[in-house]
Image: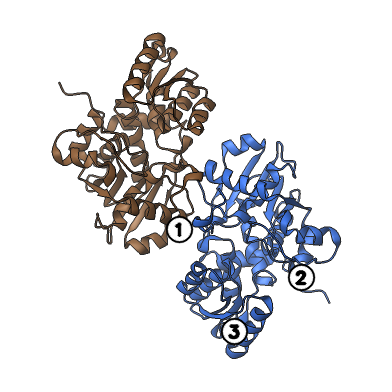
Chain colours: A blue, B brown
Amino acid sequence: MEAHLPVFSDIEKAHQLIQPFVHRTPVLSSKSINRITGAELFFKCENFQKVGAFKYRGATNAVQSLCHADALKGVATHSSGNHAAALALAAKKRGIAAHVVMPENAPSVKIEAVKGYGANITFCEANLQAREKTLAKVIANTGATEIHPYNNFYVIAGQGTTAKELIEDTLHLNLILCPVGGGGLLSGTAISTKALLSSSKVIACEPAGADDAFRSFYGNEIVPSINPKTIADGLLTSLGQLNYQIIKKHVDAVVTVSETAIVAAMRMVWERMKIIIEPSSAVPLAAIIENKIDVKGQKVGIILSGGNVDLSKLPF
Amino acid sequence: MEAHLPVFSDIEKAHQLIQPFVHRTPVLSSKSINRITGAELFFKCENFQKVGAFKYRGATNAVQSLCHADALKGVATHSSGNHAAALALAAKKRGIAAHVVMPENAPSVKIEAVKGYGANITFCEANLQAREKTLAKVIANTGATEIHPYNNFYVIAGQGTTAKELIEDTLHLNLILCPVGGGGLLSGTAISTKALLSSSKVIACEPAGADDAFRSFYGNEIVPSINPKTIADGLLTSLGQLNYQIIKKHVDAVVTVSETAIVAAMRMVWERMKIIIEPSSAVPLAAIIENKIDVKGQKVGIILSGGNVDLSKLPF
């Protein structure tokens, strides 16, 4: 049986629902980066989104889409990253409980952020099995609805609003570049792009050290991410089932980039645009720098997924 | 004899003249920094200005204000900082020569930036006497007009456009905070504020380790900056004569801040706003963090002067 996949009207619905809660982030460009790359680049700045990442869109759509009875029982997830904070804030905005399972070795700054938004945290051992088992227990106890960080209909529809805004605010893009981890942002981006701008290609950009999406896309089944190694810590996870199906259908290509190019691209954005992006956000520009995509003379939309970096651990 | 000081109509004229060349930079705010400080803060983002600093406004006004005959002979300055790059680009835009005297120990990244804008560089020993002597020689040889980085009528008028835009784009500010080094930005800010928003106070913010403006303001004569020590490397210079007169007349107070507060404020802006500012830009927010200014419940304009930092030498 085929799973029920979101389509563009679900993204339009999501956009209406989340608009009161999320920032319509700006689209910025840089003459000097255009000169260096020979293209016209338009950067969609989700680093300026609440919680510092696009994740807040999907989490908000999932929380706001719950019926009243389910909402009363709260939401739950396991995550040590941006999704946990995003879900905690989205739940707080609706006035419902968020239950977050976090590994006991999660960075204290992340724990504090999630606590700051008022979530209930349950700690567990730092492995996937323990996380899933603990989450199942929390859900059994509370009746909360699990909101998966990317393999979730409403999350994908919410993330798709990013590319929708980018396309609405920019004229005639030829290409849209998007980083890929679990595929939530990429699948939403692909749906919006093919609906609004069918002539534009969608290219997924991935670290070579975490190339499961590349291998899944060209190998015709989901290849799990095993021992990924990359500075782009938002892109370590394997593709979700829903995400994979959408990506196979709507994405034109997947390219991989080196760690050196990721750091160089991140530095270029910091130095030339004076904005802070996390390494995952730098992956599409890295693909341009490394000549993995021909952008000469093209109008290129680039999604900057977030800006959450630990300033005491910079790669410069 | 009293020197001829710029007034608000000179800033209006400057604004018209430079508008085709400079960015109207955005005014940003941050809910989380507002929560922390108990005020409504409005940040005028000159870190997004061309050349990465407000300096481009004054340099452009000075270059565009030259009569044709003078312009043909070019412009000259000695500087190792943002003003050199700003003047070089401003001259390039008018198609005239820029002669820049730089100390031979200037950081190579700054030399490359000035070269990149097409300026003629003359190197000299790294002391003020050598810089002034070399500049005099260059001017004698070329007939170029000297454009001082802050003690210059047109430069002050150009810098005043920053606060003019901030006030135009924000409603009912009670306070405007501005960092002070040579006083170019501060004097322009004070003229615009007292003309457009006479009820608003202008408070200058200065590192305690380079407190010559503080001592000059309260001591009734220019006290030179001797052996200043601060991470805010844009604020090392002494006040200019023109700047001092305007500041005495229009500025309401000068406060000083610690180095710790400057780094904390810089980090707060990087982490919460996801934008890159240089240490000099962080000095006004540092004054708020350190309780040097009472901002509770106030609407406060803050000028972020620039975003040029060396990413390999961060204080975090």
Q: Position of residue A299 (x, y in %)?
A: 67, 42
Q: CA distance from mark 1 to mark 2?
A: 34 Å
Of the residues shown, which amino acid type is indicated by label 3? Ala
Which residue carries the number 1 mark?
A: B272
Q: Are marks 1 and 2 on the same chain?
A: no
Residue found at the far top of this picture: B141
Question: Height in image: A89 above or below A206?
Answer: below
The answer to whether residue A170 is visible is: no
Q: Which mark is residue A241?
A: 2
Q: Position of residue B136 (x, y in %)?
A: 34, 15
Q: Which mark is residue B125?
A: none
* Label 3 crowd (10 A; few <14 / some 14-19 / many >=20): many
| Quadrant the N terminus of chain A occupies | bottom right
Q: Residue at x 57, y 36 (%)?
A: A31
Q: Position of residue A86 (x, y in %)?
A: 55, 69
Which residue carries the number 3 mark?
A: A144
**Residue A270 vs residue A259: left or right?**
left
Which image quarter: residue A236? bottom right
Q: Position of residue A157 (x, y in %)?
A: 66, 66
Chain holding disc 1:
B
Question: Height in image: B56 above or below A14?
Answer: above
The answer to whether residue B168 is visible is: yes
Q: CA distance from mark 3 to mark 2?
A: 22 Å
Of the residues shown, which amino acid type is indicated by label 1? Arg
**Residue B310 vs residue A64: left or right?**
left
Chain holding disc 3:
A
Q: CA distance from mark 3 to mark 1?
A: 31 Å
Name the one closer to the observer, A147 or B237.
Answer: B237
Proximity of marks 3 and 1: CB atoms separated by less than 8 Å: no
Q: Are marks 3 and 1 on the same chain?
A: no
Q: Residue at x 33, y 45 (%)?
A: B167
